[in-house]
Protein backbone atom coordinates (compact mmCIF):
# COMPACT_ATOMS: atom_id res chain seq x y z
CA UNK A 1 0.00 0.00 0.00
CA UNK A 2 1.53 3.28 -1.14
CA UNK A 3 0.64 6.93 -0.54
CA UNK A 4 1.76 10.04 -2.40
CA UNK A 5 1.97 13.36 -0.53
CA UNK A 6 1.37 15.85 -3.34
CA UNK A 7 2.15 18.96 -1.27
CA UNK A 8 4.65 19.28 1.58
CA UNK A 9 6.90 22.15 2.64
CA UNK A 10 10.09 20.60 4.05
CA UNK A 11 12.43 23.60 4.23
CA UNK A 12 11.63 24.03 7.95
CA UNK A 13 12.37 20.36 8.66
CA UNK A 14 15.64 20.69 6.75
CA UNK A 15 16.67 23.78 8.71
CA UNK A 16 15.85 22.14 12.06
CA UNK A 17 17.62 18.87 11.31
CA UNK A 18 14.34 16.93 11.36
CA UNK A 19 14.40 15.81 7.74
CA UNK A 20 16.04 12.35 8.10
CA UNK A 21 13.59 11.32 10.82
CA UNK A 22 10.62 12.59 8.81
CA UNK A 23 11.76 10.78 5.68
CA UNK A 24 12.17 7.52 7.61
CA UNK A 25 8.72 7.96 9.16
CA UNK A 26 7.30 8.57 5.68
CA UNK A 27 8.95 5.41 4.36
CA UNK A 28 7.51 3.36 7.22
CA UNK A 29 4.05 4.84 6.54
CA UNK A 30 4.20 3.68 2.91
CA UNK A 31 4.84 7.07 1.31
CA UNK A 32 6.25 6.51 -2.19
CA UNK A 33 6.41 10.14 -3.33
CA UNK A 34 6.45 13.69 -1.95
CA UNK A 35 6.01 16.81 -4.09
CA UNK A 36 7.66 19.97 -2.77
CA UNK A 37 6.14 23.35 -3.63
CA UNK A 38 8.32 26.42 -3.75
CA UNK A 39 7.22 29.77 -2.28
CA UNK A 40 9.82 32.32 -3.37
CA UNK A 41 13.53 32.71 -4.03
CA UNK A 42 14.20 32.26 -0.33
CA UNK A 43 12.91 28.68 -0.33
CA UNK A 44 14.22 27.54 -3.72
CA UNK A 45 17.62 26.32 -2.52
CA UNK A 46 16.03 24.26 0.26
CA UNK A 47 13.51 22.69 -2.13
CA UNK A 48 16.32 21.64 -4.48
CA UNK A 49 18.52 20.43 -1.61
CA UNK A 50 15.79 18.11 -0.31
CA UNK A 51 15.08 16.84 -3.82
CA UNK A 52 18.77 16.09 -4.37
CA UNK A 53 19.02 14.30 -1.02
CA UNK A 54 16.04 12.04 -1.78
CA UNK A 55 15.97 11.74 -5.58
CA UNK A 56 13.68 8.71 -5.77
CA UNK A 57 11.18 10.05 -3.25
CA UNK A 58 11.00 13.84 -3.52
CA UNK A 59 9.91 15.88 -6.55
CA UNK A 60 10.41 19.67 -6.69
CA UNK A 61 8.19 22.46 -8.01
CA UNK A 62 9.09 26.04 -8.94
CA UNK A 63 6.89 29.08 -8.44
CA UNK A 64 6.08 32.29 -6.58
CA UNK A 65 3.39 31.96 -3.90
CA UNK A 66 0.74 34.71 -4.00
CA UNK A 67 1.45 35.94 -0.47
CA UNK A 68 5.04 36.65 -1.58
CA UNK A 69 3.94 38.94 -4.41
CA UNK A 70 5.48 42.27 -3.48
CA UNK A 71 7.57 45.10 -4.94
CA UNK A 72 10.30 42.67 -5.97
CA UNK A 73 7.96 40.28 -7.76
CA UNK A 74 9.36 40.93 -11.24
CA UNK A 75 12.93 40.29 -10.12
CA UNK A 76 11.88 37.10 -8.36
CA UNK A 77 9.87 35.93 -11.36
CA UNK A 78 12.81 36.47 -13.71
CA UNK A 79 15.07 34.26 -11.60
CA UNK A 80 12.38 31.64 -10.98
CA UNK A 81 11.52 31.46 -14.67
CA UNK A 82 15.15 30.77 -15.48
CA UNK A 83 15.28 28.10 -12.78
CA UNK A 84 12.06 26.47 -14.04
CA UNK A 85 13.57 26.19 -17.52
CA UNK A 86 16.68 24.43 -16.15
CA UNK A 87 16.19 20.81 -17.14
CA UNK A 88 18.89 19.58 -14.78
CA UNK A 89 16.19 19.82 -12.10
CA UNK A 90 13.35 17.31 -12.27
CA UNK A 91 10.52 19.81 -11.88
CA UNK A 92 7.08 18.22 -11.75
CA UNK A 93 4.98 21.40 -11.58
CA UNK A 94 4.88 25.17 -11.49
CA UNK A 95 3.83 25.89 -7.95
CA UNK A 96 2.82 26.92 -5.49
CA UNK A 97 1.08 29.71 -7.37
CA UNK A 98 -2.37 31.24 -7.22
CA UNK A 99 -4.41 33.90 -5.46
CA UNK A 100 -4.82 34.68 -1.76
CA UNK A 101 -7.47 37.14 -0.59
CA UNK A 102 -7.37 35.95 3.01
CA UNK A 103 -4.15 37.73 3.96
CA UNK A 104 -4.18 40.57 1.43
CA UNK A 105 -6.84 41.96 -0.88
CA UNK A 106 -5.52 45.29 -2.12
CA UNK A 107 -3.14 43.79 -4.68
CA UNK A 108 -5.52 41.38 -6.42
CA UNK A 109 -4.78 42.71 -9.94
CA UNK A 110 -1.06 42.23 -9.35
CA UNK A 111 -1.62 38.72 -7.97
CA UNK A 112 -3.65 37.90 -11.07
CA UNK A 113 -0.90 39.16 -13.37
CA UNK A 114 1.71 37.06 -11.58
CA UNK A 115 -0.53 33.99 -11.69
CA UNK A 116 -1.20 34.40 -15.41
CA UNK A 117 2.50 34.82 -16.11
CA UNK A 118 3.36 31.60 -14.28
CA UNK A 119 0.52 29.71 -15.95
CA UNK A 120 2.12 30.63 -19.27
CA UNK A 121 5.40 29.15 -18.04
CA UNK A 122 3.58 25.92 -17.26
CA UNK A 123 2.12 25.74 -20.76
CA UNK A 124 5.48 26.50 -22.36
CA UNK A 125 7.23 23.85 -20.25
CA UNK A 126 4.48 21.24 -20.44
CA UNK A 127 4.03 21.18 -16.67
CA UNK A 128 0.94 21.21 -14.45
CA UNK A 129 0.20 24.07 -12.06
CA UNK A 130 -0.31 23.68 -8.33
CA UNK A 131 -2.83 26.32 -7.29
CA UNK A 132 -3.15 28.05 -3.96
CA UNK A 133 -6.63 29.55 -3.79
CA UNK A 134 -7.57 30.98 -0.41
CA UNK A 135 -10.80 32.98 -0.21
CA UNK A 136 -10.38 33.37 -3.97
CA UNK A 137 -11.79 30.31 -5.74
CA UNK A 138 -13.94 32.26 -8.23
CA UNK A 139 -11.09 34.61 -9.12
CA UNK A 140 -8.60 31.75 -9.49
CA UNK A 141 -11.03 29.76 -11.63
CA UNK A 142 -11.49 32.79 -13.87
CA UNK A 143 -7.75 32.99 -14.54
CA UNK A 144 -7.59 29.26 -15.29
CA UNK A 145 -10.59 29.46 -17.61
CA UNK A 146 -8.78 32.17 -19.56
CA UNK A 147 -6.37 29.52 -20.84
CA UNK A 148 -9.14 27.74 -22.74
CA UNK A 149 -8.81 24.33 -21.13
CA UNK A 150 -5.13 23.96 -21.98
CA UNK A 151 -3.87 24.14 -18.39
CA UNK A 152 -3.72 21.10 -16.14
CA UNK A 153 -2.99 20.85 -12.47
CA UNK A 154 -4.44 20.68 -8.98
CA UNK A 155 -6.33 22.96 -6.62
CA UNK A 156 -4.21 22.49 -3.51
CA UNK A 157 -5.90 22.29 -0.10
CA UNK A 158 -9.35 22.16 -1.67
CA UNK A 159 -12.21 22.86 0.75
CA UNK A 160 -14.82 24.15 -1.67
CA UNK A 161 -18.40 23.19 -2.38
CA UNK A 162 -19.66 20.35 -4.55
CA UNK A 163 -20.33 22.84 -7.33
CA UNK A 164 -16.82 24.31 -7.08
CA UNK A 165 -15.34 20.84 -7.14
CA UNK A 166 -17.23 20.02 -10.30
CA UNK A 167 -16.14 23.28 -11.93
CA UNK A 168 -12.49 22.50 -11.23
CA UNK A 169 -12.83 18.91 -12.45
CA UNK A 170 -14.59 20.03 -15.63
CA UNK A 171 -11.46 22.05 -16.43
CA UNK A 172 -9.38 18.90 -16.04
CA UNK A 173 -7.99 19.72 -12.60
CA UNK A 174 -7.41 17.52 -9.59
CA UNK A 175 -8.39 18.36 -6.00
CA UNK A 176 -5.75 18.15 -3.26
CA UNK A 177 -7.24 16.96 0.04
CA UNK A 178 -5.24 17.38 3.24
CA UNK A 179 -5.37 17.08 7.01
CA UNK A 180 -8.09 19.67 7.50
CA UNK A 181 -10.58 17.14 6.07
CA UNK A 182 -10.32 15.46 9.50
CA UNK A 183 -11.42 18.57 11.41
CA UNK A 184 -14.84 18.73 12.99
CA UNK A 185 -17.59 20.06 10.69
CA UNK A 186 -15.31 20.19 7.65
CA UNK A 187 -17.65 19.82 4.63
CA UNK A 188 -15.10 18.25 2.29
CA UNK A 189 -16.13 14.66 3.01
CA UNK A 190 -19.63 15.43 1.80
CA UNK A 191 -18.14 16.89 -1.38
CA UNK A 192 -16.12 13.70 -1.90
CA UNK A 193 -19.26 11.60 -1.49
CA UNK A 194 -20.72 13.35 -4.53
CA UNK A 195 -17.68 13.57 -6.80
CA UNK A 196 -15.80 10.34 -6.01
CA UNK A 197 -12.04 9.88 -6.17
CA UNK A 198 -11.37 10.05 -9.91
CA UNK A 199 -9.78 13.51 -9.55
CA UNK A 200 -8.60 13.43 -5.94
CA UNK A 201 -5.02 13.41 -4.64
CA UNK A 202 -3.80 13.42 -1.04
CA UNK A 203 -1.52 15.98 0.57
CA UNK A 204 -0.31 17.15 3.96
CA UNK A 205 0.80 20.76 3.40
CA UNK A 206 3.45 19.99 6.03
CA UNK A 207 4.29 21.47 8.45
CA UNK A 208 0.79 22.99 8.46
CA UNK A 209 -2.71 21.53 8.88
CA UNK A 210 -1.78 18.35 10.73
CA UNK A 211 -4.66 15.85 10.79
CA UNK A 212 -6.41 14.67 13.91
CA UNK A 213 -5.03 13.47 16.35
CA UNK A 214 -2.04 15.76 15.69
CA UNK A 215 -4.00 18.94 15.01
CA UNK A 216 -2.11 21.97 16.32
CA UNK A 217 1.24 20.19 16.09
CA UNK A 218 3.74 20.22 13.20
CA UNK A 219 2.60 18.13 10.24
CA UNK A 220 4.84 15.75 8.28
CA UNK A 221 4.52 13.61 5.14
CA UNK A 222 3.96 10.37 7.07
CA UNK A 223 0.60 11.75 8.17
CA UNK A 224 -0.73 11.55 4.62
CA UNK A 225 -1.63 7.97 5.56
CA UNK A 226 -3.89 9.32 8.32
CA UNK A 227 -5.65 11.56 5.80
CA UNK A 228 -6.19 8.54 3.58
CA UNK A 229 -7.46 6.41 6.45
CA UNK A 230 -9.97 9.07 7.50
CA UNK A 231 -11.35 9.49 3.98
CA UNK A 232 -11.57 5.75 3.36
CA UNK A 233 -13.38 5.16 6.62
CA UNK A 234 -15.90 7.95 6.07
CA UNK A 235 -16.60 6.90 2.48
CA UNK A 236 -16.86 3.21 3.29
CA UNK A 237 -13.88 2.25 1.13
CA UNK A 238 -10.93 -0.01 1.80
CA UNK A 239 -7.76 1.87 2.62
CA UNK A 240 -5.98 -0.16 -0.06
CA UNK A 241 -8.43 0.98 -2.75
CA UNK A 242 -8.17 4.63 -1.71
CA UNK A 243 -4.37 4.51 -1.57
CA UNK A 244 -4.18 2.91 -4.99
CA UNK A 245 -6.50 5.39 -6.70
CA UNK A 246 -5.12 8.59 -5.14
CA UNK A 247 -1.52 7.51 -5.71
CA UNK A 248 -2.28 6.63 -9.31
CA UNK A 249 -3.88 10.06 -9.70
CA UNK A 250 -0.77 11.74 -8.28
CA UNK A 251 1.48 9.96 -10.76
CA UNK A 252 -0.82 11.01 -13.60
CA UNK A 253 -0.95 14.61 -12.36
CA UNK A 254 2.83 14.91 -12.25
CA UNK A 255 3.46 12.74 -15.34
CA UNK A 256 5.53 10.24 -13.33
CA UNK A 257 5.77 6.52 -14.09
CA UNK A 258 2.85 4.76 -12.46
CA UNK A 259 3.59 2.89 -9.28
CA UNK A 260 3.84 -0.86 -9.47
CA UNK A 261 1.27 -1.82 -6.82
CA UNK A 262 -1.52 -3.97 -8.23
CA UNK A 263 -5.09 -2.76 -8.01
CA UNK A 264 -6.83 -4.10 -4.88
Image: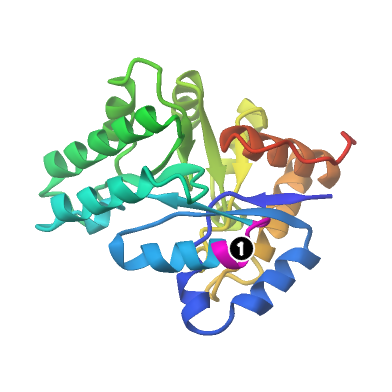
Q: Which residue is mark 1?
A: 211
Relative height, residue 184 to residue 112 (above, below): below
Tell me if mark 1 has few (under 14), some (14-19) or many (20+) residues whose alpha carbon lies within 10 angstroms of its own. many
In the shown orientation, is residue 16 left or right of residue 65? right
Residue 244 image position (x, y, % from top left): 78, 39
Which quarter of the image is occupied by the C terminus? top right
Q: Residue at x 15, y 54 (%)?
A: 75
Residue 199 image position (x, y, % from top left): 60, 30
Relative height, residue 195 to residue 184 (above, below): above
Q: Residue at x 54, y 43 (%)?
A: 176
Whether residue 133 is visible to the viewer of this picture, yes or no, is no
Residue 177 image position (x, y, % from top left): 57, 46
In the shown orientation, is residue 55 left or right of residue 248? left
Count of numbered circles in the view: 1
Residue 249 image position (x, y, % from top left): 66, 34
Extent of the magenta region: 52-57
In the image, farthest residue toward the bottom: 17
Label 1 secondary element: loop
Relative height, residue 56 to residue 160 (above, below): below
In the image, farthest residue toward the top: 148
Q: Main secondary structure of the magenta part?
A: loop
Q: Nearer the viewer, residue 186 or 150?
A: 150
Q: Is residue 220 shown in magenta? A: no
Q: Residue at x 67, y 50 (%)?
A: 4
Q: Nearer the viewer, residue 33 or 146?
A: 33
Whether residue 46 is visible to the viewer of this picture, yes or no, is yes
Amino acid sequence: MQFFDTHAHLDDALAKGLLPAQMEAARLAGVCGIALPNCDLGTLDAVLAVARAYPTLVWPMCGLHPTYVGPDAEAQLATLKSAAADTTHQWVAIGEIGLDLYWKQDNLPRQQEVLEQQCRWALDLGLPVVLHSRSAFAQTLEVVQGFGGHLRGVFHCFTGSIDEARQAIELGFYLGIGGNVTYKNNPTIETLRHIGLDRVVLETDSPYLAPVPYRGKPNQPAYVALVGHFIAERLGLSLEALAFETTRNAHTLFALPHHSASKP
